Image (spheres, rainbow, N blue to C red):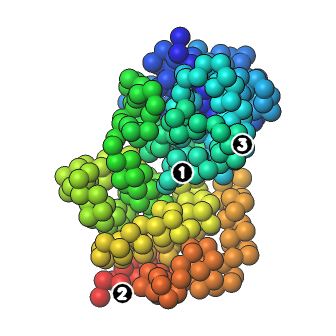
Amino acid sequence: MSKIVIFGAGNIGRSLVGQIFSKAGYEVVFIDVLKWLVDLLNKKKGYRIEVKDVNPETIWVDNIRAVHAADVEKASLEVSTADIVATAVGPNNLESIYPIIARGLVKRLKSEKRPLDIIICENIRNSSRIFRDGLSKYLPEDYPLDSMVGLVETSIGKMVPIMTEEQKKKDPLLIFAEAYNKIIVDRKAFKLGVPKIEGIEPKDNMAAYVDRKLFIHNMGHAATAYLGYITDPEMKYIWQAIENKHIRSTVKSAMWESGESLIREYPKEFNRQNMEEYIDDLIRRFDNKFLGDTLYRVGRDLPRKLSRNDRLIGALLLDQKNSVSAPCTTIAAAAAMFFRAKDEKGNLYVKDKIFAEEIYPCGIDYILEQVCGLDPKKDRIVFQEIKETYQVIEADPKNWMDAIKSLRK
């Protein structure tokens, strides 16, 4: 039986990667830092996924076990004997898994001398380069990394909402998720060939699909949250925001601003027809009432989501590069400055609390330079348009449509 080792038994690790490989007959081995989660997975030998969509269903994922990440010897042994490895730990946690993977790769070279493909499910641009640089630090200088390891970039679009504490107590392994089950992968990066598994979709120009996910899906999702919040700070769900005709129209227009830029950037991959299908499907998914996705989950972590290469500022810079006017993306970026959605306990996300209390009081110029990474001279147009839009919203947040009118003049 083939074996996949998955670093990260969280939302994407369990709801997507573990699910599709288990269904394909793989033994699934999770490696995670949470001992209680590892112990429970080993005790139950499986977990449930509740599909929250028009056609709800319950999926039981079995043939699994888990290893605690602190047991480096055992975890690295699992890597050394794996048929494939995947990561779903979040970009900020990659550094913690490199030593384990490196140790496993060294063991593997001594025993099997068989290449290993690592599917990087982290939704970051240039993830293979980032992963290679991080991994190299823990490998011997003469390790044949380029021939022995396939570093596979992905685009992950599955939406997994936050569950309440009460729901978690009833079944700590239960996952709520939408029906969408695709992992877009870089066909050319595999050393042993693309696994023939339902849900794995190989592409040749991976950069195009990573950018599409970031600048249309992620940007549009975040825009929905930020515009929803400034429209009504008491609004809770993404579906409530996207059903507001002004928000829906603005979000869709923002997604099309990125869409036009991506068509120009990657003309062999995208055209108006396939872009329209992608955007319309996303709007439909944002409007999924059954999922119960919140503005808080989608919009939280402002310092990351407002950074230069992320969904909003990155999209605006791509628009500028391709001479695409982007008033709706600009207003989404400006609206983000005012986002203060709270969790079910009434708390701001930790990094958003820092943003609100320490960064926001420093002023819009400080935010644009230090958080967004914009140069007031080199990025003058984007810098100035966000600043002016911010000032219009600041004067009257609920009448944010006035900011769009001023940008379109």
Amino acid tagged 2: Ser
Q: Which mark is residue 129?
A: 1
Q: Residue at x 48, y 39 (%)?
A: 152
Dot 1 or dot 3: first in sequence order is 1
Q: Which of 370 and 391 lies nearest the eye of the viewer?
A: 370
State which quadrant residue 357 falls in: bottom right
Disc 2 versus disc 1: nearer the observer? 1
Residue 405, position as x, y percentages in the image: 33, 83
Residue 242, position as x, y percentages in the image: 40, 57
Note whether residue 301 is visible.
yes
Question: Badge 2 is on which residue?
Answer: 406
Mark 1 surroundings within 10 Å by alpha-carbon count, few (fewer than 14), some (14 through 19), many (20 or more): few
Note whether residue 94 is visible.
no
Q: Residue at x 53, y 27 (%)?
A: 115
The correct choice, above or below, for 76 with respect to 65 in the image is below
Residue 76, position as x, y percentages in the image: 71, 28
Mark 3 and mark 2 residues within 8 Å of each other at the beta carbon: no
Mark 1 and mark 3 residues within 8 Å of each other at the beta carbon: no
Q: What is the spatial separation of the Cα atoms under label 1 and label 3, in whole angstroms? A: 15 Å
Q: Which of 146 and 13 lies nearest the eye of the viewer?
A: 146
Q: Give the residue furthest to the front.
A: 142
Question: Badge 3 is on which residue?
Answer: 138
Dot 2 or dot 1: first in sequence order is 1
Q: Residue at x 51, y 63 (%)?
A: 310
Q: Give the residue furthest to the left.
A: 273
The correct choice, above or below, for 192 with respect to 338 in the image is above
Element under label 2?
helix
Q: What is the spatial separation of the Cα atoms under label 3 and label 2, in whole angstroms? A: 53 Å
Tell me if 369 is positioned left or right of 257 in this view. Answer: right
Amino acid tagged 1: Arg
Q: Residue at x 68, y 84 (%)?
A: 362
